[in-house]
Image (cartoon, rainbow, N blue to C red):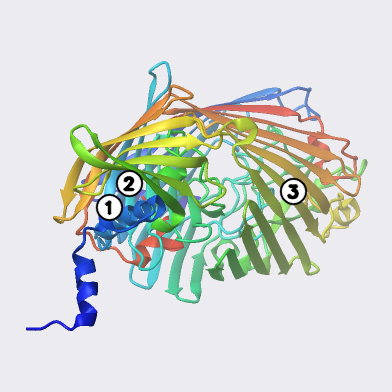
Amino acid sequence: MKRLLLVAAIFLASAIPAHAGEWSGYVAGEFLGFTENPQFSSQYNTYLSVAAEPEYIHEWNEGDDIFTFTPYAMGDNHDYRRTHVDIREFSWNHAADNWELATGVSKVFWGVTESVHLVDIINQTDLVVNEDGEDKLGQPMVNLSLIRDWGVVDMFVLPGFRERTFPSKNGRPRFGVDIDTDRVFYESGAEEWHTDFAVRWSHYIGAVDIGIAHFHGTTRQPRFIVRPAAINPATGTISEINPLYEIIDQTSIDLQAIYGSWLWKLEAITRSGQGDRFYSYAGGYEYTFVGVFESQMDIGVITEYLYDSRGDEIKQNKAVQGKPFDLSTFQRDLVLGARLTFNDAQSTEVLASVIVDLEGGGQSYNIEASRRFGNNWKLSLEARGLTNTPNDNVMASLKDDNRLRLELARYF
Amino acid sequence: MTIPDRILPALLLCLLPISLLAETPEEKGLAIAQEADRRDSGYDHYTNDVKMILKNKHGKESIREIRSKTLEVENDGDKSLTIFDRPRDVKGTALLSFTHKEGPDDQWLYLPALKRVKRIASDNKSGPFMGSEFAYEDISSQEVEKYTYAFIKDDTLDGMDVFVFERYPVDKKSGYTRQIIWMDKEQYKERKIEFYDRKNALLKTLILTDYNLYLDRYYRAHNMHMENHLTGKSTLLLQSNYNFDVELTDRDFDKNSLKRVR
């Protein structure tokens, strides 16, 4: 799939008219350091990586037609799976009076909540870039948008599937058992060439924005299986697990309402096709205090509640019986956060949050900060860690992974 | 030709200069604002480019570049789409804004890295726009209904005859108690504005110069200098490339148009 995309991109890139286009993008260096020694001997205490994401844009017909090409490349000094290239975008977008058509490799975001992105399903997660899951792989698609008075209907045909990326044995943080992405299992006989479909209606009525969507196709979030050969018969330990991509049906709703300084948010999904039907939702609010302490700073207070009917314990028994199991991380969790927006010339921002597992699964901490230097440089900092994580929780393999990530990016 | 007795007084009244009528300072201030609004309405739509040079108190500069599209909406505030080009890390970010004469404005922000369209609250109007000395409320569509008014005096400014009047924001979320406007009597355009903060202290002064005339009717200041007296910082806002002939419709100002911004 990836190779084909590259070939198609190179072929089409040579056909781009040489004039009137514009390049922009960034190059970034990243340092990732851990405060404790690793749980697994194949891991390291520091990682260095570089990444680049240039973007070429060409517009014609007064902006009614737009061509976008966004390649991405990353190199890491220890984790060979982080070293990868991708076509984030290679698409032609045409806009008419009451419809739009996007064709090619592109990215689509759905959703409203801050801590998780449950309803966002069109693109696969590029998990090796950052464990927050907000980096996405380019998805081949034809997307027709019908723009009506009663809302926008988006129809998607998604030919071809992208596998989720996972860290290698040398990667950190990672799950306790190596995820063998060289041997991937599919429910559909068409494997990665199954054509997926999605439809979404979205609208806004006064202070309320709403989206209702249905997706049919290969799940973006795999379950896992243990092959008998991966079980050591003497000790019963598992050496590796394999992703299993099943055909799912997922229906979702996302909702946001504004009331003064309050933003109320809800995302909910129900999915069938991966064992029993399950459901999951995230809901909460963000309240913003504008101009606090007689300064120009805004403080947003975020509270979100997360529920997932699948549970977050390690399904050890299922695994050794050869049944598929999932690695879902939230069952009943509460997110408390604060967003500081300094509104200064350097666009300084800080987001701090803690996720509390309400069923005794510990807490996870997260601080993100960023600031621009000069006109073209940006420094970002992330500090993450876990406390009180019980050994039977999916997150247990990350409990010694308190970490600091520092990224310096040059934009052009 | 005879004129019926009963309409003669009415006709005579019409011939009187407006200033001779008993008019309160509030009425006169409002009348000036309404006249300025009348003269500036009917443009339908336009696009323009904006460059901001932010200067801190040590004289260090940072640059902002944005493109803007504006659509006039009958009986309501303007719709506008603001596209950020510089600094480069926010390139492609766009703000869609539906101004309303009454009640909060509707605003959506497009974040290109995530391809996310985010509905945002509009009550941070007192906050700085892109870290500059211009607050959101300084650059958003100025509707007559957003203020109450009081005329102060006739005066001269740089050799121009001007009205001097105050306006008071209706919205409690405004960062100001009042603004003093110096508006020239010939074109009804603001030449100078003083902004007084919530404690009624002089916070900022805006000087507007280099007015250009478009479509023989609409004056636009190409040079706006905002000085913050509290922090010593300043922002020079330069406008250029005004185009009133461009075809723009509601479709250029919807949530889908945000995603097409480049």
In percent of width and height, residue A289 lies at: 65, 42
Quarter of the image for residue A280 reads: bottom right
Q: Which residue is mark 3?
A: A303
Q: Secondary structure at mark 1?
A: strand
Residue B192 horizontal/vertical position (percent) = 31, 37
Residue A363: horizontal and vertical position, in percent?
A: 83, 39
Q: Quadrant of the N terminus of chain B?
A: bottom left
In the depicted view, which residue is nearer to us: A368 or B47? B47
Q: Is residue A255 above or below residue B64?
A: below
Callout 3: residue from which chain? A
Q: Residue at x 34, y 64 (%)?
A: A94
Instruction: Name which of mark 1 and mark 2 comes first in the sequence.
Output: 1
Q: The residue under label 3 is which amino acid type?
A: Thr
Q: Amino acid at mark 2?
A: Arg
Q: Gap in Å between the C-alphas at discs 2 and 3?
A: 35 Å
Q: Chain of mark 2?
A: B
Q: Could you say which is closer to the camera, residue B41 or residue A72?
A: B41
Residue at image position (35%, 62%) is B252
Secondary structure beneath dot 2 equals strand
The answer to whether residue B261 shows anywhere in this view is no
Q: Are marks 1 and 2 in contact (CB under 8 Å)?
A: yes
The answer to whether residue A387 of the structure is visible from this angle is yes
The residue that disc 2 covers is: B67
Asked whether, in this view, residue B70 is left or right of residue B6, the answer is: right
Report helix, strand or loop for mark 3: strand
Q: Is label 2 on the same chain as label 3? A: no
